[in-house]
Image: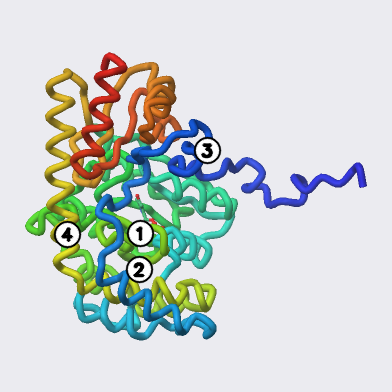
Amino acid sequence: MSSFNPEQLANPGVRQLRPYQAGKPITELERELGIKNIVKLASNENPLGISQKVKAALAEELNDLARYPDANGFYLKEKIAKKQGVEMNQITLGNGSNDVLELIARTFVNDSHEVIFSQHAFVVYPIVTQAIGATAVAVPAKQYGHDLDAMLAAISDKTRLIFIANPNNPTGTFLSAEALHDFLKQVPDNVLVVLDEAYTEFVPVAERSPSFAWVTEFPNLLVCRTFAKAYGLAGLRAGYTVSDARIADLLNRVRQPFNMNSLSLRAAEVALDDDEYLQQSVAINQAGMQQLVNFCEQRGLSYIPSYGNFLTIEVGDDAEQLYQELLQQGVIVRPVTGYQLPRHLRVSIGLPAENQAFIDAMVKLGR
Ligand SMILES: *Cc1c(COP(=O)(O)O)cnc(C)c1O
């Protein structure tokens, strides 16, 4: 048995892979420090907590948990279709949008292909690319955001997929509808474009792209959305993609039939109609963003202007150390060294008191 080496049995891409670094859980820091009242601003979660309407619906759903979920998610698809003006057969549901991102890659990409994304892009893109054994093409960023011209120039005969997050995480940068539309017109239709709009609800309505309508114009476009951020369902795992119905049909062949569980299906249905909660989420985010921006300006800290529910702040060469010192103060933020931003920390927008706890800890640490 001593010669047994599972590393050699793994797919080549997997051997080089480093696992996704999630935000540190509150319970973990509690265990380590033996303290309570920890503030977590590390995973772009909704600081309002779950909506009361969703909570009530979940309580009812508990009674049916001995049954398998609806493998086709009929009622949720029906709701999404109505709300977003798309057909039900264009929708693919996922156990979080991460699940959908991976599903898209597994359905269409193999080890002979190249996958394009931007420097500082969401780390799930390189992970899924590498796990498949495809070649990642990371295009240098332009002022922290996507350089669409450079991404177009990076397309080769081998390119099968392009990932674009708009707004982008962890930079919060945003591409205008005009710029994106212009880009889509130039991408050949044998290259799929995944437009990941995880933070779109935080973008002013007038500035958002008509992305679902674009799916008709560009059949190679897939638009991804999540319930984890503005809808406050990060712990339940719920997301979806809208695409050409023929693409959805292909995704459905690979998809695990019960990838969304009964609770997340029901919660997402109710959340989609809970306009009051959504408006509150957006309002609390706006106020908190202003609070953090004001702090940065007062203290002379640079930050990347953000369209999301987080602010990425340039703190200097000792970002990793500051992260650790903030932990000692009971404040969890997110180091972004893995995103080639070693001088920055990403701070999710919390409730006013949580943002203040971060500010107070920063001041205490002389920042
Ligand atoms: C948070 C986030 C998601 C959502 O992930 P879920 O799996 O739905 O929780 C997707 N894309 C980006 C860029 C994100 O930051």
Gap between marks 4 and 2 measured at Cα: 15 Å
Gap between marks 4 and 3 measured at Cα: 44 Å
Callouts 2 and 3 close, C-beta under 8 Å:
no
Residue 305, placed above or below residue 270: above
Circle 3 is placed at which residue position? 31
Q: Is mark 2 within 8 Å of ligand 1?
A: no
The x, y position of residue 50, in whole percent, is 30, 61
Q: Nearer the viewer, residue 306 or 182?
A: 306
**Where's the C terminus, which quadrant?**
top left
**At label 4, which amino acid type do we have?**
Ser
How many residues crowd mark 1 within 10 Å: few (<14), some (14–19), many (20+)? many
**At label 2, which amino acid type do we have?**
Thr
**At label 1, which amino acid type do we have?**
Val
Q: Nearer the viewer, residue 18 or 366?
A: 366
Circle 2 is placed at which residue position? 241
Circle 1 is placed at which residue position? 194
Q: Which mark is residue 224?
A: none
